[in-house]
Amino acid sequence: MSVPLPKSNYIGPEDYLEMELSSPVKNEYLAGEVFAITGTNDSHNLIAGNLYMLFREHLRGTPCRVFMSDVKLKVAAADAYFYPDLMVTCETAPDSHFREQPKLVVEVLSDSTAKFDREDKRQLYQSLDSLQEYVLVAQSCMDVRVYRRTDDGWDMNIYTDGATIPLASVELNIPIESIYEAAWD
């Protein structure tokens, strides 16, 4: 979740990156505008944590790593830095604070960010040549939408109760119930 700061706070990307090193609050950056990220609720956190554990265990022993919402994703074409809920990358990064070549990005939808995640952020992420799948996970019901890169562009599939979600980018099939385990207890 993010909230724009006043326009008078326009800064360049280098200044943004320097600011983030000591900021007590995480901020996303888009073409000179800085957006403070607000906290999440327990369902959001549990869903993201479940996915992290599934990816972490599956990727063990490979050169790929899964990162949670504390590592930024640079989208150079948009002059942007975001904190995706999860991303998987196999790159050797030149900077330990951000990545540029994810294979997979996951956003757990919040009421305040769902529209941006589904539309604008999706298009920005899809501009990354390395991205193979973009996953949107609802937090109030079992609804997972996977956008997959194809030879003709991007396809989208919806998975609901009882489904197994194939993620070709990381060669993993996930039962939807594993994503939502304990999310509403």
Image: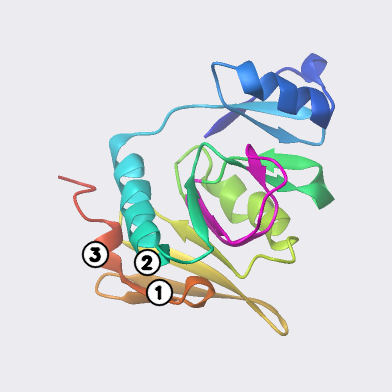
Q: Are marks 1 and 3 in contact (CB under 8 Å)?
A: no
- Tell me, yes or no, whether the highlighted magenta stretch contains residue 89: yes
Estimate the x, y position of residue 178 in percent, counting from the top left: 25, 62
Q: Residue at x 71, y 45 (%)?
A: 74
The label nearer to you, 1 versus 3, is: 1
Q: Quadrant of the C terminus?
A: top left
Residue holding disc 1 = 172
Please state which of residues 153 and 46 is positioned toward the viewer in this rendering.
46
* Residue neighbourhood size for the residue with mark 2, other residues' Cα within 10 Å, grouped as few (<14), some (14–19), many (≥20): some
Q: Which element carries disc 1, helix, strand or loop?
A: strand
Q: Which mark is residue 112?
A: none
Amino acid type at image mark 3? Glu
**Of labels 3 and 2, the one closer to you:** 2
| Residue at screen point 74% across, 66% down | 129
Circle 2 — which element? helix
Residue denoted by label 3 = 177
Residue type beneath disc 2: His
